[in-house]
Amino acid sequence: MRFGPGVGPAVLGVDAAELRDARVPLDRIRPEAHVRRLVSAAESDPLGALLHETRRRLDGVDRSVETGIASQLGAGASVAEVVTSMGWSARRLHRHALRVYGYGPKTLARVLRFRRAVGLARAGRSFSDVAAECGFSDQAHLAREVRALSGVTLGALVR
C-alpha cells in the first residue's frame, strides 16, 4: 500500500522513521483489536476494508501542515524558505519531517522532485525538458539523481 507524503503515519498511527525502508505486516504495526478486525474483513473484501479504515483514520485529521511542507518542497522551495514560511526552527522542521515522512526535509525535497520528473517523463516530455523544468542543472544531473534514488535509469522507469 502506498500513501501520499505524510499520510501513512496518520493512517497507521506510527512514526514514519520507524517504517522507512521496510515492509512490515500491518498486524505488527498496530496489533489492536480493530486491526485484527480489518485483517479479518480484508479476507472477504480487502480493498473495501482497507479503504474504510483509511477513511476512518483520516476523518477530521488536519493535514494542512504536511500538505504545506510537501507542496512547498515539491515546488522547489529551499528548506530555509519552508522554515521561514512555517515560522519554525530548522531543527523543528527536521524532527517533524522525520516523524511524518521518514526522512529529513532535504531528502523529502529530492524524492518529490524525483517523482515530479518521472511523472513528466511518463507524460511524454523529453528528458532535457524534464531536467530543466524540475530544476536539475542538466540532463546528466537528472540521470544521476534518478539512478541514485531508484537504482535504474529514467528510461526504464518510463517504460
Image: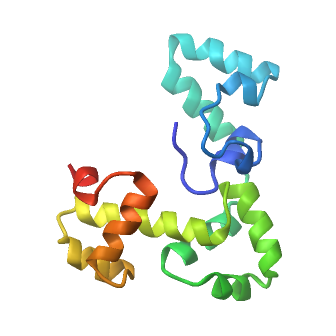
Rendered location of residue 109, percent (x, y): 54, 71
Q: Is residue 89 visible?
A: yes
Rendered location of residue 124, percent (x, y): 17, 64
Q: Residue sitting at 33 percent across and 61 percent down?
A: 118
Q: Residue sitting at 28 percent across and 59 percent down?
A: 154
Q: Quadrant of residue 56?
A: top right
User: Vertical placement of 69 versus 118: above or below?
Assistant: below
Question: Depth check: 10 or 149 in front?
Answer: 149
Q: Quadrant of residue 90?
A: bottom right
Question: Depth check: 115 or 137 in front?
Answer: 137
Q: Is residue 129 left or right of residue 59?
A: left
User: Vertical placement of 141 versus 26: above or below?
Assistant: below
Rendered location of residue 157, percent (x, y): 28, 52
Q: Is residue 59 visible?
A: no
Rendered location of residue 84, percent (x, y): 72, 89
Q: Residue sitting at 70 percent across and 47 percent down?
A: 9
User: Vertical placement of 55 versus 148: above or below?
Assistant: above
Q: Is residue 84 left or right of residue 120?
A: right
Q: Residue sitting at 51 percent across and 69 percent down?
A: 110
Question: Depth check: 54 or 92 in front?
Answer: 92
Question: How many marks are shown on the rendered structure?
Answer: 0
User: Vertical placement of 36 versus 140: above or below?
Assistant: above
Question: Depth check: 49 or 128 in front?
Answer: 128
| Colour scheme of the picture | rainbow
